[in-house]
Every structure is written in C-alpha cells, then in structure tokens.
Amino acid sequence: MKSFFVSMMLLVSFGYAQNTLVEARPEIGWDSLKSLIVYPEIARRAGVEDIARVNIQIDALGKVVSVDFGGSGMFSNSVKSTLRKVTWIPETYDGKKRSSQVVFDVQFQLKESKNFPKHRVLLIESSNPAVR
C-alpha cells in the first residue's frame, strides 16, 4: 500500500512537471544587464528622465531578432545597442527551446535631479482661429 501511494505521488508530480514554461532571460542576469545600459550624456546634462517599454524578440538560440523601444529617442540607441550585444537564455516549454518575446520597462532616473534644469513647457498662442 505504501509503494502504491509513493507511485501515485510520483505520477502526480510528473504530471505537474509537464507543460512547464521557463521564460527567457539574459544570460548575464537582469542586474548585470541593467549595469550595461548607459545613461546618455545628452539626456543627463539636460536633466531628462524617462520610463520606456522595451519589447524584444528572441529566437530559439537566444539571439535578439528585433528590439522595439517605446520611449524618448534620446535613450533608444543606448538600450538597443546594449540589448543586441547580450545573449539570452531562450524560453523553454516542456524542456524545448523556442522563440519568444520579452517585454520589460527601463527607467532612466537621475540620482540627483535637483541640480538639473526643470522641464519647461512653452505655450504657443495664435490670434487666428483654427480653420474647420
């Protein structure tokens, strides 16, 4: 009876082990990836901060196929060039490697923004009404 119970537990645990999804991740780790992305000098001097949505396509070998960057153009080159250099551990499903997409946010934040100029809004007015 005891061996029957152990056998059933093994079958049940084996059933749960099937259909497992392991998401793609940078081979160097997320913290190391973060340290490789450079804050562009022009954005730093201007006091510009941004949060950008990044969507990358990774093939089954872990190579970056494409990078879509949804943020300020000032930060685009820094993120894209870094991500194209990094090797990824591809997503696996049931132990089989497959292509996938990884979506994450990158936040560019200045440590001490009080010394930088504040963002200004220019209001442009016209006395002419809009043409409809």
Image: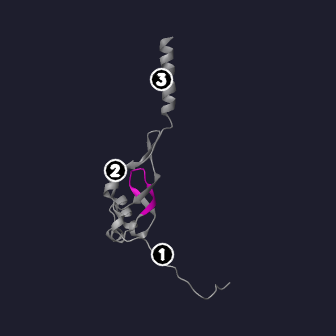
- Residue shown at 48% from the left, 75% from the top: 121
Mark 1 crowd level (few <14, some 14–19, many ≥20, 10 Å Cα)? few
C-beta proximity under 8 Å, tags 2 and 3: no
Q: Nearer the viewer, mark 2 or mark 3?
A: 2
Residue 59, numbered circle: none
Pick the quarter of the image with the C terminus: bottom right
Specify which label sits upstream in the sequence, 1 or 2.
2
Mark 3 crowd level (few <14, some 14–19, many ≥20, 10 Å Cα)? few
Splitting the image into 4 quarters, where does residue 75 fall? bottom left
Q: Nearer the viewer, mark 1 or mark 2?
A: 1
Q: Which residue is mark 3?
A: 10
Tell me the element at label 1: loop
* Residue 8 image offset from top left, x and y in percent: 51, 20
Give the amino acid at mark 1.
Val
Q: Which residue is mark 2?
A: 31
- Residue shown at 37% from the left, 58% from the top: 83
| Frontmost residue, 17 versus 112 | 112
Q: Nearer the viewer, mark 1 or mark 3?
A: 1
Residue 121, numbered circle: 1
| Frontmost residue, 68 versus 36 | 36
Q: Residue furthest top?
A: 1
Start-end of magenta stretch: 50-64
Give the amino acid at mark 3.
Leu
Q: Is residue 13 left or right of residue 26?
A: right
